[in-house]
């Protein structure tokens, strides 16, 4: 009965080793979770502080959720699409109006940006450790950075993930076969069209990445791919195009007007705001609402690094110009396109009045510089990598040499591998790591001749004093980036308690108005829509200036409703110019106002 049973050799049954994430990938995952968790904690602490512009987007979401309207533009203007309102509308319908439900989609967009940036860094030739560095830089969150990423005030939270997605699609379109590219062409066109509707600040990236695609795939674009791309682009921009045709609006004119109105700013002020204050604020190096002198060092490093990174990418393209199929050409081309887009964003901001008139607040226009971080930091990593890799290089190379000897020898491989496994030398302990790594293993086994050509020098060892100095300098800049970002992030944490206290005072105002049965009020611009959204339109507010004259109402219907109510109250922050003006109307006269003081606020009621 056992004649047909054959005993299998023991070597045939091999235990399956559980596949684990490489250490840098695991660390990147943890850092990414920390970045998202930090921002989630800020949201529960009511930080960053909300405002009436964010509340205006909330009112659009409220109207969409109720089916009362489907706005194309941010209320009161003919530019800046309402994508954030449509993303938040389902949550507003489920949970009611609040700042938190507005920011859940923006937090999700930030998490997507981290993931796409990590993937983009890897596709552009960066190793896992460099991808970890990029994620760490983007996980930090200074004042201006978290405002751009979390406040649903129109445009900014969706720009960065969309830009990173365009760059990734560009890489894919440059390297995949023609049969697999049509869906990517459609996605590229759709994202570009949506961005044109939402906020054209990202347009420099669209143009530079698009130019790269035209240069590499112009024959394909002349055929079916061009039709697919154009159709998807028109579909994404359809809300803007249809509204412009229906109402005769020109969104380009509106966008140009948003660059700063009134008296033109002096060129010195523009350049100071764009080139000195802009890069540190956009990178996240500054404290809440200001930039200390020591935090401006990035203004010097940024243009140097931008030029150096562009030169490096261009040099790679020139060096590989003889071979269109070179694997280095596409990453170098995309890096150059990203750097060109970043330069375009900075240049467009520098020529705007906003850079000179309101440089601190208007630095939000530079938020999409973060898309270029994987390309911008590349020269630093290339310079620093030999010094970073030196402690591990000798052991890694020794293990690879033994694998090469196994591959080149005529002796049976099993016997040699057994000898390697039985040895107690330190290099052999690295065997499993080399065999399992992406760079090691049999598929990427180095040639014996190439190892001999190394001359015995450990891989990654600096070639000389100049290379060592460059590596030390690059490491110092990287440490400065992380250290300054951490310091600015800590400053945000320190102010979170004050922001939360202010939000509590505003909630007290809402509760008091409800207790007083007040339904219509007048207040300042930064009071009105915030109050109306917080009450779910139970309280309507018309905007007045500090001299009590009518101000700018983004929703004129509110003013009509308020003007028709003889019992309309007034609301003003305690200590504000508007409160001082209204205090003059207090008294014993029959037409005087009575005041109800709430923590941080004053409510003025008409005497009945």
Image (cartoon, rainbow, N blue to C red):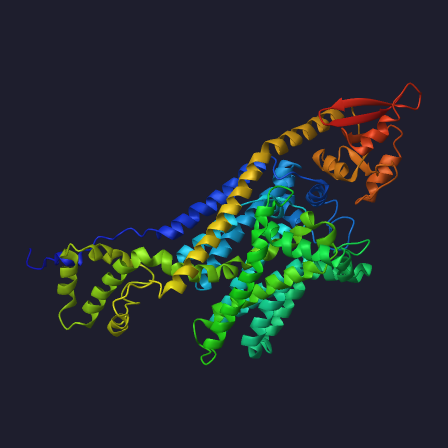
Image location (x, y in percent) of residue 2: 6, 55
Give the residue at x 63% y 54%. Answer: 276
- Camera-nearest residue between 554 and 490: 490
Give the position of the C terminus as an image quadrant. top right
12 to the left or right of 242: left
Residue 521 showing in the rendered view: no
Residue depicted at x 66% and y 54%: 365
Query: Which sits in the foreground, 234 or 292?
Result: 292
Quarter of the figure with residue 222: bottom right
| Place of residue 317 in the rendered image (x, y in percent of width and height, measured from the top left) | 49, 74
Instruction: Work out whether residue 74 can be spotted.
Output: yes
Q: Is residue 242 positioned above or below 518 on the image?
A: below
Residue furthest out toward the right: 590
Residue 236 in the image, given as x and y percentages of width and height? 65, 61
**Furthest residue toward top:** 588
Left or right: 136 as drawn, with respect to 303: left
Q: Quadrant of the N terminus?
A: bottom left
Q: In the rendered view, does 545 fall on the left or right side of 360?
A: right
- In the rendered structure, the answer to whether residue 466 lies left or right of residue 36 reads left
| In front of the other: 298 or 47 | 298
In percent of width and height, residue 442 lies at 27, 66
Q: Residue at x 47, y 55 (%)?
A: 118
Residue 402, quarter of picture: bottom left
Give the number of callouts.
Answer: 0
**Residue at the front extreme of this rendering:** 465
Position of residue 273 relative to residue 338, above or below, is above
- Above or below residue 448? Residue 289 is above
């Amino acid at each position: 009965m056992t004649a047909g049973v054959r005993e299998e050799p023991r070597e045939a049954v091999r235990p399956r080793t559980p596949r684990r994430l490489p250490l840098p990938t695991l660390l990147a995952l943890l850092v990414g979770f920390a970045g998202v968790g930090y921002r989630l904690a800020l949201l529960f602490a009511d930080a960053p502080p909300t405002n009436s512009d964010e509340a205006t987007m909330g009112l659009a979401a409220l109207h969409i959720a109720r089916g009362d309207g489907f706005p194309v533009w941010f209320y009161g203007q003919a530019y800046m699409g309402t994508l954030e309102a449509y993303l938040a509308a389902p949550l507003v319908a489920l949970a009611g109006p609040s700042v938190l439900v507005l920011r859940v989609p923006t937090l999700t967009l930030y998490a997507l940006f981290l993931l796409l940036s990590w993937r983009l860094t890897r596709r552009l030739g960066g190793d896992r450790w460099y991808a970890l560095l990029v994620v760490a830089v983007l996980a930090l969150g200074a004042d201006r950075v978290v405002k751009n990423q979390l406040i649903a005030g129109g445009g900014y939270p969706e720009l960065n993930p969309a830009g990173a997605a365009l760059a990734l699609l560009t890489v894919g379109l440059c390297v995949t076969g023609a049969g697999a590219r049509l869906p990517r062409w459609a996605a590229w066109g759709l994202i570009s069209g949506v961005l044109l509707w939402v906020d054209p600040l990202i347009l420099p990236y669209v143009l530079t990445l698009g130019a790269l695609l035209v240069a590499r795939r112009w024959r394909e674009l002349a055929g079916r791919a061009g039709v697919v791309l154009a159709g998807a682009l028109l579909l994404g921009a359809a809300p803007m195009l249809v509204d412009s045709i229906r109402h005769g609006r020109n969104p380009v004119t509106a966008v140009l007007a948003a660059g700063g109105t009134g008296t033109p700013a002096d060129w010195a002020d523009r350049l100071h705001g764009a080139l000195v204050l802009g890069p540190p604020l956009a990178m996240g190096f500054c404290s809440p609402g200001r930039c200390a002198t020591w935090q401006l060092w990035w203004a010097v490093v940024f243009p140097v690094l931008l030029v150096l990174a562009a030169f490096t990418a261009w040099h790679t393209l020139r060096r590989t110009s003889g071979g269109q199929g070179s694997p280095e050409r596409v990453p170098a081309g995309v890096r150059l396109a990203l750097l060109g887009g970043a330069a375009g964003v900075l240049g467009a901001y520098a020529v705007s009045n906003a850079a000179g008139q309101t440089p601190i607040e208007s630095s939000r226009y530079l938020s999409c510089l973060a898309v270029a971080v994987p390309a911008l930091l590349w020269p630093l990593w290339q310079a620093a990598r030999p010094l970073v890799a030196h402690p591990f290089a000798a052991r890694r190379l020794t293990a690879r040499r033994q694998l090469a000897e196994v591959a080149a020898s005529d002796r049976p491989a099993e016997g040699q591998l057994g000898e390697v496994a039985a040895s107690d030398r330190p290099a052999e302990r690295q065997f499993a790591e080399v065999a399992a790594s992406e760079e090691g293993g049999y598929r990427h086994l180095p040639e014996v001749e190439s190892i001999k050509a190394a001359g015995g020098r450990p891989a990654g060892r600096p070639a000389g004093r100049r290379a060592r100095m460059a590596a030390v300098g690059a490491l110092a800049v990287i440490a400065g980036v992380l250290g300054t970002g951490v310091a600015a992030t800590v400053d945000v944490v320190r102010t979170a308690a004050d922001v939360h206290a202010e939000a509590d005072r505003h909630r007290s105002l809402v509760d008091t108005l409800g207790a007083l049965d007040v339904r219509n009020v007048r207040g300042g611009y930064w009071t009105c829509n915030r109050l109306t959204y917080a009450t779910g339109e139970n309280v309507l507010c018309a905007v007045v200036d500090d001299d009590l004259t009518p101000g700018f109402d983004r929703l004129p219907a509110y003013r009509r409703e308020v003007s028709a109510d003889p019992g309309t109250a007034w609301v003003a922050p305690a200590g504000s110019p508007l409160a001082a003006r209204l205090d003059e109307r207090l008294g014993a006269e029959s037409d005087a106002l009575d005041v109800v003081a709430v923590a941080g606020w004053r409510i003025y009621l008409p005497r009945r």
